[in-house]
Image: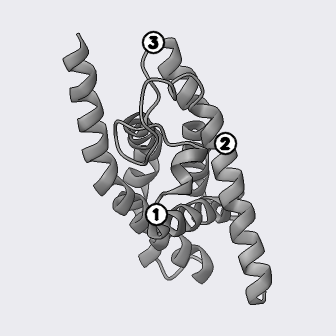
Amino acid sequence: MNFIGSTMAFRSVVAAVILTLSTFAVGAEGHYAPGHGALEVFGAEAMAFTPLWVKVWLFCLIGLFAIGTYFAWKHPVARWATGGFIVSMLSGHIIFAQMGLPFLGGSIAIMHLVCWTPALVILLRQRPFFKPAEPLSFRIWSGLITAAIVFSFSFDINDATTYINYIRSLE
């Protein structure tokens, strides 16, 4: 793929993420500031001033989970990773709305922690990235997705804690 094609693909993915996340933020925008922090609404407006490295990270993360669908037919851990990603994207807003809680960056972090942990546990227990019997492409993907989830959790744990402490202070 040439530079123009990859740039167009990047823009398409970013646009899809913006549209998806902005629909999750409906209802909370009037009460909270837009942004990518734990107590901010992460939607289309926030994406406009999100740092470039965060946009690139989102593109890579979405790409890694999407590649997981290729491996999902033969590797259960890929099903756990891809399924966890899909569930976190589709159900987060609904779950938090049912609980009467605002859907902010910290909510997204909680959904990541809940939905991605099973895949991470399996990846760390089985360590398919070290198994020579596995195809090289799967070993590379499993190593990258493990690193991506761990890296995401390094931010998500802090954001989830900030969000939970904020919700507790409202009581």
* Location of the C terminus (image quadrant): top left
* Image: 105 above or below 144: above
Q: Earlier in the sequence, mark 1 or mark 3?
A: 1
Q: Let me know if residue 72 appears in the view.
A: no
Disc 1 residue crowd, few under 14, some 14–19, many 20+, Cα 10 Å: few
Q: Let me know if residue 31 appears in the view.
A: yes
At label 3, the amino acid type is Gly
Residue that appears at 26% across and 28% down = 164
Asked whether the beta carbons under mark 1 and mark 3 sit within 8 Å of each other, the answer is no
The span from disc 1 to disc 2 (Cα, nearest Å) is 16 Å
- Residue 54 is tagged as 1
**Badge 2 is on which residue?**
20
* Location of the N terminus (image quadrant): bottom right
Residue that appears at 42% across and 30% down = 32
Asked whether the beta carbons under mark 2 and mark 3 sit within 8 Å of each other, the answer is no
Q: Earlier in the sequence, mark 1 or mark 2?
A: 2
Disc 3 residue crowd, few under 14, some 14–19, many 20+, Cα 10 Å: few
